[in-house]
Image (cartoon, grey):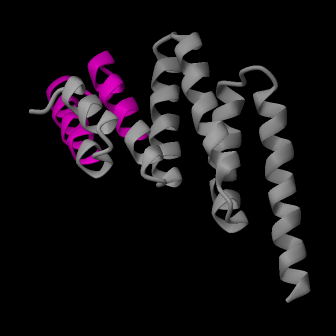
Amino acid sequence: MPTLLTVRRYADAGELTLAADLAAQLDDALSSAHGPSHPRTLEARTARADTRAALGDLSAAISLYRDVAERHMYAGDHQTASQIADRAHILWQQITDPRTAAAISPAIVRMRAQIPGQGGYVHAQQYAAHLERVMHDAAVDH
């Protein structure tokens, strides 16, 4: 089984695809051994999200970060939950395709309802509404 150190070494060396594959293997192995909410599993899942984000797979990274943030919240670790939720939120705003970003909006708004962070819920609602306007305007123009 790979380790987090191995994942980080490959990621730091620019071997992102290998790092992402190893992070996924580690996440799956730890989840099977300890359960999906175990601290070691969440650490591996965060590394998995980090590598997916570094590869430009923002949708996958956001989904993984959301899962980690929500599990930390349920465990009562509000500070870590908020930090991880912020990562998902920031990546959501970096998605350049409005259709993809709009598809993710409901999940981000739901997450921010549970883990608001500093202005996170209101901002998520506003950004989701903005994306809907962009999508509507694009449909009208065609």
Instruction: Give the left or right position of residue 47, taking residue 121 as reference.
Output: left
Magenta residues span: 20-49
Front one among 99 and 125 = 99
Q: Where is residue 75 in the image (x, y as percent from the top left)?
A: 46, 14
Q: Which residue lies furthest to the bottom in this view?
A: 142
Left or right, 115 with reference to 137: left
- Location of the C terminus by quadrant is bottom right
Q: Quadrant of residue 88?
A: top right
Decide if residue 134 is in sight here. Answer: yes
Picture coordinates of residue 59, whole percent (x, y): 52, 53
Q: Is residue 60 above or below residue 43?
A: below
Please say if 117 is above or below 53. Answer: above
In reply to whether residue 10 is colored magenta, the answer given is no
Q: Which one is nearer the viewer's eye here, 20 or 46?
A: 20
Give the residue at x 77% y 40%: 124
Residue depicted at x 65% and y 38%: 89
**Is 16 positioned to the left or the right of 126 in the image?**
left
Residue 141 x %, y %? 90, 85
Which SS does the magenta portion mostly show? helix
Relative vertical location of residue 45 with respect to residue 72 in this rendering, above or below: below
Outermost left residue: 1
Residue at x-position 30% and y-position 19%? 38
> With respect to residue 80, does 7 lie above or below?
below
Check if residue 29 falls in the magenta segment: yes
Quarter of the image that includes the N terminus: top left
